[in-house]
Image (cartoon, helix red, strand yellow):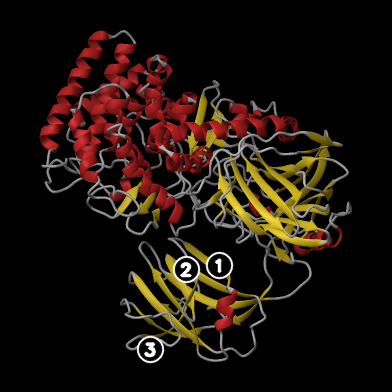
Amino acid sequence: MKNLALLSVLIVATGCGNMSKPTAVYEPMETNSLRAPAYPLVTIDPYTSAWSFSDKLNEEETKHWTGKPFPLLGGIRVDGKSYRFMGREEIPLLPVLETAASMKWEGVYTETKPTGNWMAADYQPAGWKKGVGAFGTDGNPNRETPWNTRDIWVRRSFDLGEDVSKETLYLKFSHDDNIEIYINGMEVATTGRGLNYDLIKEIPAEVIASLKPTGNVIAAHCLNDVGGGYVDFGIMKKVKRGDTFEAVAEQLSAQVLPTQTFYTFRCGPVDLDVIFTAPALMDDLNILSSPFNYLTYQVRSTDGASHDVQIYVEATPQWAVDKVEQPVTFERGSKKGIGYLKTGTAEQAVLGKKGDDLRIDWGYFYLAAAESDRTALKMNAYYDSKKEFMETGTLSADGGRTSGDMQKEMTVLAFTDNLGRVGDKKTGGHLMIGYDDLYSIQYFNDNRMAYWKQEGKVDIMKAFEDGERLYPELMKRCGEFDKQMMTDAAAAGGKSYAELCALAYRQAIAAHKLVTDKEGNLLFLSKENFSNGSIGTVDVTYPSAPLFLVYNPDLLKGMLNPIFYYSESGKWTKPFAAHDVGTYPLANGQTYGGDMPVEESGNMLILTTAIACVEGNADYAAKHWDVLTTWADYLQKEGLDPENQLCTDDFAGHFAHNTNLSIKAIMGVAGYGKLAGMLGKKDVEAKYMQTARDMAAKWVEMAKDGDHYKLTFDKSGTWSQKYNLVWDRLLGFNIFPTEVAATELTFYKTKQNAYGLPLDNREDYTKSDWIIWTACLTGSQADFDALVNPVWKYANETSTRVPLSDWHMTSNGSQRGFQARSVVGGYFMRMLEKKLMK
């Protein structure tokens, strides 16, 4: 795929009626070559979050970060011919080769790695066992043959009863976890770790050409590295009908910038730019918390002639439900020049669910746009809207067919814009995709609205009105911010590092919700995505903090405020910091099953110190001095040689004598001493800084293991990343000898794999946020590049197509767990280092 130059400022130049008609001027800066594991499209908060999980925007259905359908479909009509540029229709399919959902099928399988070209049609599977599909662990649908090992290889032979050479064919498959599927020896699908049922992937023309009347083979290898396992597959053919887009636009480029994702398409004689913009500007909290994102489209002729062009965008009510079987309602209207389509569940159980792998099912989803004689908004049955657009280029004003039962008939919310004759100057428009969640968070049994609502003074229509009015300004500001951030990140850590930061920026922000408490204190509450759904988790705040320390430490205070309140109110009575304040979106008190005493107390002290260093004063610490003192005293007593307890890397389990956790405790004690000094408490500063120095000296004696330092004090021959040590230099403690960091970096370079440095000696997996912290231990650019370049390679090459996972295998780059989490804000540690070390 061609790469798109980095784009800076979008300038709105002309108007047309009530609808702006922008002419875009781009200033190329450099080429961004990172292929994203998934591309952010709409990133508002943990619930309203849509991504493209493939290289091409029109290759697959767009999805929520969890992988569930969040459909956006885009089409363009050029001189009467229609092209699909975004998403994918529900394709009417008929089976050529049934899956297990409709027919048991016979195959052969082995659970021992085969030799030779096992996926080829003429391969002889000697010793393989006979089985009936589907294959899997207990509890999977239509499972016939038990599979309980780590790997399985399956071959299914089939004959064709019809000529399919001129058909459009699709592989239909289900998998848990990683699967690779071949037809007649040619790869058709490969996935990373995950569980998905009934995926559809178009079979390439060369594979279709290989199909014979008899003797064809589908072969699959599935690796189950965690939880259950499942394998099922078949072949479908497309039913030809006149109400789906007749052609697919050719995607020329795709690029992720901090606040925007850019695509360019070739649509016959015109080129189309599609720009998704989240106004995620941290210097303006009203804008940052906006309940909408922009979708901008721009078209120009490429052949010197003018062409008649119309744009079509649709969404479904799946954006407003957790499950497709939930009944929905619809509304169409306008207010102060803004037209809108609205949908939500009939039940409206506000804040009625908590947990991890859930979508919001209260509040309302909107498509909104400025009204003009060019545009139309309509709700209609799934195929009717597309058919009308392709036939006429617009949508009629009459009401369409709507159904509250999505399983019976899917209704779409559709928007069109008739751009008219388009020449070689770019012309286009935009719409807003928004969500009004009514109430966002329950904070200690008090339901709180989103920050943008200003305690109920602003409603969603006012937000859309402001969004339309501010569109030119916000697009300009976002473009300028993107350009400046990429420049600053490249100056701090190089081009590859800047590209990683661009990918992490919106993901980290959108994994939070911004509200205030009754007293007006800021609450910036994280959702622990795809790990356990906790809200306000301290050891998720800790790795994400560098991003917010760089751009707005008030947001980091908003993450720490709930934990301070929890202790200071007496609701949490233990002498160490809590792990969380509940399960998203209910922040009513810790729900995690175990404590992390040293971990969370150290995190709170270190981050409070970091805020003071960034702001140049310890005023925030002074407000919470008593509880900070309690936690510092706990770390003095228990932190040097921690007992058997969890740290932030809790997926690795409990273990005692953790040397990296000990460093965190020492940093926490030193942080308290530094804060005391900044507050004029010189005697307290002297006492705690000396304690921290004494602890550091003992640490060096206890952890030294020849050419490196141990994983645990009691086990020689072990090692781990000492990412917590980064604060010793950045916060100016300087209580560890400089050779500790230098020794560790030299050792780490001997332990790297293709896709990064393992977390420690126990497993192949790593945490990419910690790698970037570890890369900052010495301040050396060479050390930084050595550790960060494999992280870029992981993001660029991973087969796991999900919003950036922070937990991956270093040998093959596949996801180990977690996705779409805020912890990737930790990628900004290098930028924070440059800010603090000026």
Q: Nearer the viewer, mark 2 or mark 3?
A: 3
Q: CA distance from mark 2 to mark 3?
A: 25 Å
Q: CA distance from mark 1 to mark 3?
A: 29 Å
Q: Which mark is residue 175?
A: 2
Residue tagged 1? 199
Q: Which residue does the image show at 74% across and 53% down from the upper left?
A: 302
Q: Are marks 1 and 3 in contact (CB under 8 Å)?
A: no
Residue 461 position within the rendered picture, expressed as x and y whole percent measured from the top left: 75, 35
Instruction: Note whether 456 is above or below 686 in the view shown.
Output: below
Judged left or right of residue 214, residue 372 is right
Q: Nearer the viewer, mark 1 or mark 3?
A: 3
Residue 713 position within the rendered picture, expressed as x and y whole percent measured from the top left: 14, 40
Q: Nearer the viewer, residue 769 or 357?
A: 769
Res 144 → quadrant: bottom left
Q: Which mark is residue 124?
A: 3
Amino acid at the residue labelled 3: Gln
Q: Does the rendering let one see residue 818?
A: no
Helix, strand or loop for disc 3: loop
Residue 90 position within the rendered picture, expressed as x and y whole percent measured from the top left: 67, 65
Q: Which mark is residue 107?
A: none
Q: Which residue does the image show at 27% across and 50% down from the upper left?
A: 752
Instruction: Note whether 146 is above or below 63 in the view shown.
Output: below
Q: Which residue does the image show at 83% across and 33% down from the upper left?
A: 336
Instruction: Note whether 650 is above or below 237 in the view shown.
Output: above
Q: Nearer the viewer, residue 199 or 281?
A: 281
Q: CA distance from mark 2 to mark 1?
A: 9 Å
Helix, strand or loop for disc 2: strand
Q: Nearer the viewer, residue 738 or 720?
A: 738
Q: Are marks 2 and 1 in contact (CB under 8 Å)?
A: yes
Amino acid at the residue labelled 1: Leu
What is the quadrant of the C terminus in the image? top left
